[in-house]
Amino acid sequence: MAAGQRLFVKVTRDSLPQVKDKYPFIYLERGRLEIDDSSIKWIDSEANVVPLPVATLNTLLLGPGTTVTHDAIKTAVAANCSVCWVGEDSLLFYAAGFLPTADTRNLKMQIEISTNHGKSLEVARRMFARRFTGADLAGKTLKEMMGLEGHRVRLLYQEKAQKYQVGWKGRNFTPGKWELSDVTNQVLTAANAALYGILCSAVHSMGYSPHIGFIHSGSPLPFVYDLADLYKEPLCIDLAFALTRDMAGRYDKHKVSSAFRQRVIDMDLLAGLAKDIPDVLGVEHARRRRK
């Protein structure tokens, strides 16, 4: 290459990091996302400027007081980085931007499975089987399995309360009345919302739809809620009771966000999703049978 010439390498979707290789999320509030020399920068309320490597991020969670330029959204989408709008400290999940995917193969497969009653029920059984280790779910209807799950979760709450010596009166959250919930419920709500944001962005990135579920229905993001139940015990429920004891009755959003993010990283959630979604949908089972 001649002196003074620059080598340009075209960046394509295939050359970008896959979901499993990305950092899970960054939460931002009270600032502005802009473009700086074809990359995204974050300007906070004190005029500090932070460059964001969006190509290596799975999702940006935008909290209150954030603004974003049109070019910043274009750059994030080109880097396959989702953008989600959430409440303070990821307290509530409001909306997610849709990412264009390379093809519709995964979406078509998801639709075909969901419209086949037998296959759809098998997906639900595989999801429930991950929470009921060793249980025989053959022949169980969706309603019966949902009943078993409800009982399991109630017992799980009680077990965690005893383990961490925390008082527990049940799951309680009223939208718009955050202050009425106890600390454990506040942490649960915040952690759940952050988990939904991560899952929604990952589902979009892999070409699936968050709107086509197999257990949940009648809600905006049924597939996200289906998947969330696979990870809530370590990421949300156990965390909520552990932090309630550590925070001694005073909710600390910074501690909640930091602890939740660390658990997501420690369990390598994104890599797990890349394997778990095809597995619960039966894709891995089909491949093994063809060999």
Image: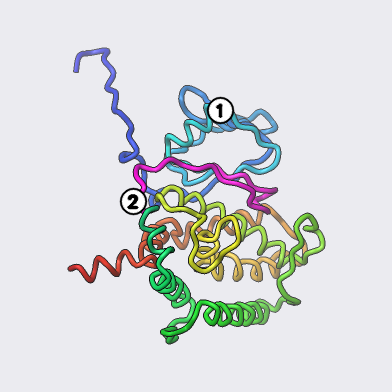
Q: Find residue 281 and report its image quarter.
A: bottom left
User: What residue lies at 64% left-to-right and 69% top-to-bottom?
Assistant: 242
Image coordinates of residue 106 in percent, x first then y, are 36, 53
Counting residues from the N terminus, which is met first, the one under dot 1 or under dot 2?
A: 1
Residue mark closest to the camera, 1 vs 2: 2
User: Who is closer to the viewer here, 161 or 121?
Assistant: 121
Return the mark for residue 124: none
Return the mark for residue 70: 1
User: Who is closer to the viewer here, 64 or 215?
Assistant: 215
Confirm whether the magenta stretch covers residue 283: no
Please state which amino acid type lies under the numbered disc 1.
His
The quarter of the image holding the C terminus is bottom left
Q: Are marks 1 and 2 in contact (CB under 8 Å)?
A: no
Q: Find residue 282 and report its image quarter.
A: bottom left
Image coordinates of residue 202 in percent, x first then y, are 46, 52
Q: Is residue 272 left or right of residue 33?
A: left
User: What residue lies at 41% left-to-right and 58% top-to-bottom?
Assistant: 111
Q: Secondary structure at mark 2?
A: helix
**Does 99 appear above or below 200?**
above
Confirm whether the magenta stretch covers residue 94: yes
Q: Secondary structure at mark 1?
A: helix
Q: Find residue 97 and report its image quarter.
A: top right
Image coordinates of residue 152 in percent, x first then y, are 58, 81
Please state which amino acid type lies under the numbered disc 2.
Arg
Residue segment shown in magenta: 83-106
**Does 161 appear above or below 81?**
below
Local crowd at mark 1 within 10 Å, few (<14), some, or many (≥20)? few
**Does 162 appear above or below 249?**
below
**Does 240 appear above or below 195?**
below
